[in-house]
Image: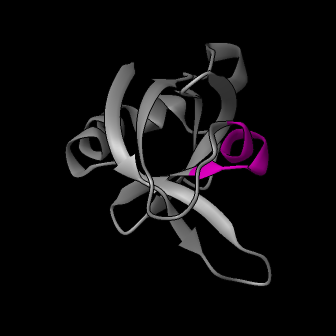
Amino acid sequence: MQLTFTGRVIEWRGPAPYYFVPVPDQESADIGEVARMATYGWGVIPVEARIGEVTFTTSLFPKDGGYLLPLKNAVRTPEGLDAGDDVRVELTVRFQTPSAWQ
């Protein structure tokens, strides 16, 4: 499953700041329809994402009926991203193989 959307970078304060892009409602609903085939546990969804020139693998975190795309510094720094910036995200859900289900 491939999706493209625009989202705003948010900062989650904790012991250390974390940055995420919330996946919009419609795209979150689409992901939710295939989540059982993709998740490897705890509701997280493995994905490959692209923002600007940076392609990376990570897992979406479930949050309040939607998903958050985490942004490591290795993604944010080269693209010059900070909280409040709008970004275009290309996202591919990485489905689990049947052998991983056993």
| Residue 94, horizontal then vertical, whole percent | 56, 22
Camera-side residue: 10 or 61?
Answer: 10
Camera-side residue: 31 or 72?
Answer: 72
Q: Residue at x 78, y 77 (%)?
A: 16
The prevailing secondary structure element of the residues shown in magenta is helix
Does residue 48 lie above or below 13 as drawn? above
| Residue 74, horizontal then vertical, whole percent | 78, 41
| Residue 61, horizontal then vertical, whole percent | 55, 55
Does residue 52 lie above or below 69 as drawn? above
Q: In this image, 7 relative to 74: left or right?
A: left
Q: Residue at x 45, y 37 (%)?
A: 36
Camera-side residue: 60 or 5?
Answer: 5
Q: Residue at x 63, y 15 (%)?
A: 97
**Residue 73 magenta:** yes
**Residue 79 magenta:** no
Q: Is residue 101 visible to the viewer in this orientation of the structure?
A: no
Q: Quadrant of the C terminus?
A: top right
Q: Quadrant of the N terminus?
A: top left
Does residue 87 lie above or below 64 as drawn? above
Stretch in magenta: 70-78
| Residue 100, horizontal then vertical, whole percent | 71, 23
